[in-house]
Amino acid sequence: MATAIPIVPIHELAGHVGQSVTVRGWLYNRRSSKKLHFLEVRDGFGIVQCVVAEAEAGDELFARAGTLTQEDTLGVTGTVRAHPRRAGELELAVTGIEVLARTVAPYPISPKEHGTEFLMDHRHLWLRSRRQHAALRVRHTVVRAIRDFFDERDFTLIDAPIFTPSACEGTSTLFQTDFHGQPAYLSQSGQLYMEAAAAAFGKVYCFGPTFRAEKSKTRRHLAEFWMVEPEVAFADLDGAMDLAEDMLCSIVTRVLGERRSELATLERDIGRLDAVVKPFPRIGYDEAIRRLAEAREARRDPAAAPAPQWGQDLGAEDETVLSEGFDRPVMVHRYPAAVKAFYMKRDPLDPRLALGVDVLAPEGYGEIVGGGQREDDLGRLLESLREHGLPQQAFEWYLDLRRYGTFPHAGFGLGLERTVAWLCGLGHLRETVPFPRMLTRLGP
Ligand code: 4AD
Ligand code: MG
């Protein structure tokens, strides 16, 4: 009795050299000459070249292979052997093809160049292409690395709600919805809930989607993005910076260890990621302003935007200029309290400043982490709510955390998509998320 031919995922072909196997997937590309068809078949795990040689396949199979078009669904059977030119790669010498389904029309995304809007309109199909596939596999590994990092350090995962009654990060970027006749907002951040959870569990994190109705149409802004937010009881600003530094190193190590081939597909300069080791530079806002003024001076370009004055927030361009001075992420701490969120603790040494930190990725990928130490004094928090024009009533539950067992604590939020964009070397956040939501895009 003949043994059944196994269906083998492409990444496991190495264990079957010399054997007959079936690969089940879709035709990615076909090149044909008089006597040979080269079928590139993808199965979600990889892409393998399948060679149909007229001399060995016979007339019928050879002719049928010549009719196959991109994204036909196939079961391809053949013998696994070394690729004749690409060292370490395998190919299939085809002995049979089962056509499981034919495409009904030419596949919209051909190897020729397409505009970005066209590709985004076909995001549901674009996901199949090599680069998109690679970026989303890196994203998957970053998520795993983050979860493992916190789980291994005794953090408890506490999920934050998505419907919220109040703002966390300023009222200008709230998505309002109707919650059974009552106004509600899609969560901008789980932080306030993590503060409550830190008093109950000590070390906690949430990891989920967050929403910002920013009217900005930049490559760094999504309307829906994922954020991981740890919060630690009895930690201070330095503790939050240490944690962010360790987490980022852990993510980079994991991606370099597990996603080399995806980074190669994305043509990422690995050397830039190898440089990401502790310690990260930590500079105060004052020094950041000084550096920006110097950089502006050195450019001697009268058309360039002026460097920010003390008291102003840093813009995306400022973040890029600052990051260019370092080969690893830079932590900028102690911003003027006036440009930061209401919950930040004032610096006891200089009450104009907030004990907050932004981590700026290298190579101009911008702010990937924002966080710091929280105001734990009831009176000062009440004052801050007033200064920010926020309604105290909506924050009564949050104020309870200062009324009952207040405690020093700190945490941060890491933007998943900005982190993936940096690691993959992608110019725009839209390719770091399976189905992006942006100012001008709700579909597919
Ligand atoms: O700096 P943000 O606004 O901080 C917070 O939300 C804090 N409550 C987090 C905390 O302390 N628990 O956002 C944190 C990070 C940013 O550094 C950035 O990486 C990302 O979230 N982010 C965005 N990513 C994509 N699109 C947007 N519109 C983003 N806004 C923020
Ligand atoms: Mg921020």
Image: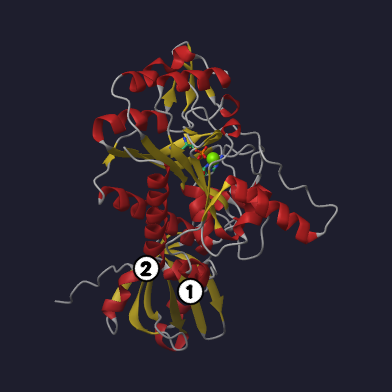
Note whether ligand 1 is within 8 Å of mark 1.
no
Q: Are marks 1 and 2 in contact (CB under 8 Å)?
A: no
Which of the two marks, 1 or 2, is nearer to us in this view? Answer: 2
Which of marks 2 and 1 precedes in the sequence?
1
Q: How many marks?
A: 2
Q: Is residue 217 placed above or below 66 in the rendered structure?
A: above
Q: Is residue 37 above or below residue 129?
A: below
The residue depicted at 36 percent of the width and 22 percent of the height is 402
State ligand 2's quadrant: top right
Amino acid of disc 1: Leu
Of residues 338 and 265, the one drawn nearer to the viewer in this rendering: 338
Residue 425 position in % (x across, y down): 56, 61
Residue 99 visible in the shown view: no
Please give the name of the residue rendered at 36% of the width and 35% of the height, measured from the top-left corner: 409
According to the image, label 1 marks what residue?
Answer: 39
Question: Badge 1 local density, few (<14 within 10 Å), some, or many (20+)?
Answer: many
Label drawn at residue 257: 2
| Element type at mark 1 | strand
Identity of the residue drawn at 51% across and 69% down: 265
Q: Is residue 42 visible?
A: yes
Q: Which mark is residue 390?
A: none
Q: Is residue 26 left or right of residue 32?
A: left
Residue type pointed to by label 2: Gly
Tell me which residue sits at (48%, 66%) in the image.
Answer: 273
